[in-house]
Amino acid sequence: MTTFSPTPTDADLTARFRPALDSIAHGAVDRDRNRELPREQIRLLRDAGFTALRVPVEHGGLGATVRQTFAQLTDLAAADPNLTQALRVHFFTVEGFLAGGDAEGLRRAGDSWPTGTAATDRHRTVTWYDLDAGVSRAAAVLAGAGVGRGDGVIIQLPNSVAYLETVFAVWRLGAIPVFSPPAHGSAEIRHFASHAPARFYVSTGTPNRHLARVHRDIADLAGTVTMILVDEASPWDGADALPVPDAASVPSEKLAFLQLSGGTTGVPKQIPKTHDDYLYSVRASVDVCDLRHGDVLLVALPASHYFTMSSPGILGAVQVGASIVFAADPMPTEVLPLIAEHGVTHLALVPPALISLLNFPGRDAYDVSSVRTVWVGGAKLSEAAARRVRPELGWTLQQVFGMAEGLVNYTPLDASIEEIVSTQGRPMSPWDEIRVVDDEDVDVPEGEPGNLLTRGPYTIRRYHRAPEVNARSFTEDGFYRTGDIVVFREGTLTVVGRAKDQINRGGEKIAPEAVENILLTHDAVHDVSVVGVPDEVLGEKIRAFVIPRQDAASDPAAHGLTPTKLRKFAREAGLSSFAVPDLIDIVTEFPLTGVGKVSKKAQQG
């Protein structure tokens, strides 16, 4: 193989890639006509070193200049223009690392747009320069508490500038964020502490009643988990007296964070995302969603959700220099004034929040004309609600169907109204692979409903430390079993339903077993069965059927078995607020199937 100097000559590069480009040009028309993914052609480019054009020589690349890279991309476009589009996100990602890596994204933003508004919450507004300085102060405080490279750090903070500073400070230290929404209870925190594992827990110093209970309930972890409480208004007091640690260098293929997935076990599964995974996903989302420098993103859903963080979300805003406005919650009384005050251009909502906004009687009092796009995901949006968005709000609706495990689909911004309202979009990457299969993993005909399997450049191949779950959730050749029943027709996905028992309550994924296990710890409870039941606003509500123990059967209420008391018990036992049952029935028996199992279908009505 030819050895190049740190900057290869144009002739060197042309000689190196010409054979591969000639091979790619042959058959390009047939591939386009047959809609074939050019995997073999990508392999040729990779083997020739094309995907390492801009990577420095000392890291195994060719060290080409930007001018040389564009020249080669022009030659590639002449051979097969589809390949330049396919590699677009790859080269964006490489350039991001050459500029300093993802953890230093805020530092680059501070240098590029020092006086531009970066983020706003109810306490403060900061510029990009201020935000970068805040990350350094946060890193000093966290390092002073002992946080170091490779440490797991549970982050359970409300939507705030302090949340943003904490996440990037953890990355700057080379540590690993473990994201936990504020609604999570102590049961989840304990699991993350032992399973991640995580040695640090960062939360608010001004907690609401729920988080105050979480703090009390995990106090006994003090010997193994260090609790760090921050005041969102002035979170890093004392940082000036501490040394600012150097930024850690972490290879892009290493673990970046642990995201959470609702699941069929008692607690959320942990999704290991590498820096490569999420940078690819974020960059592709920015491209598909047309998020630009100077736009204003409203963060109304919990910031720690993957949808809110990465589709394109907070991380996309940081990449392009869009301002971030944090809302306390997605209620219309919170969202509408912020849109009007800050000139919001983009926001993400789950269907219940969008429906609440559409039905809000005081909506017309606010100027919401600045909004270009609303992303709606987390659960299926009804076609009736989707049709109301453009006429009533004047916004472009972009449906989002995805999962923290990987695959993300968007309805294109220029799609027909019928595609926007009746489908859940198209895979955002040309390398997302989709299979729709029957229960025997045999592909079904196009347009027929089946189980969705997916594999792609940002989809995980395993859950974190969950071998039994992995065996059920992934095929031998690496496809992820999403649990969704879909129809795939002409490149678009339409969600039909869920194959799993998982309940989808307003975008929050709840495992029935998690709720059942909590209620079963009540002294007067004999058995519990939890199901999801249809709801026009939330999509599904949680319904629990409870059989009292024999000594409580004659007077369940006297033993604390009323809906109100059982909900209070569940909350105090550490169950997430969104997982507390909406409906509770005290019954004497469960309906059974012919083989003696509980008939959840009968319970669902």
Image (cartoon, grey):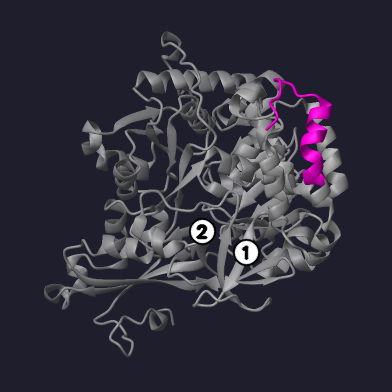
Extreme-right residue of the structure: 78
Q: Which type of secondary structure does the marked residue at label 2 adopt?
A: loop
Is 213 above or below relative to 534? above
Residue 367 location, quadrant: top right
* 443 with respect to 294 (left or right): left
* 258 with respect to 457 (left or right): left
Q: Amino acid at mark 1?
A: Ile
- Frontmost of labels 1 and 2 is 2
Can the viewer see residue 430?
A: no
Q: What quarter of the picture does the C terminus occupy?
A: bottom left
Say few, some or many: other residues with alpha carbon within 10 Å of mark 2 (under 14 / 14 to 19 / 20 or more): some
Q: Which residue is mark 1?
A: 434
* 597 with respect to 96 (left or right): left
The residue depicted at 61 percent of the width and 28 percent of the height is 105
Image x and y of residue 427, in percent: 67, 58
Extreme-front residue of the structure: 1
Q: Nearer the viewer, residue 333 or 426?
A: 426
Q: Which residue is mark 2?
A: 478
Say few, some or many: other residues with alpha carbon within 10 Å of mark 1 (under 14 / 14 to 19 / 20 or more): some
Q: What quarter of the picture does the N terminus occupy?
A: top right
Q: Does the segment drawn in magenta span residue 244?
A: no
Image x and y of residue 275, in percent: 54, 38
Q: Does the segment drawn in magenta span residue 6?
A: yes
Asked if disc 1 and disc 2 are in contact, CB closer than 8 Å, the reply is no
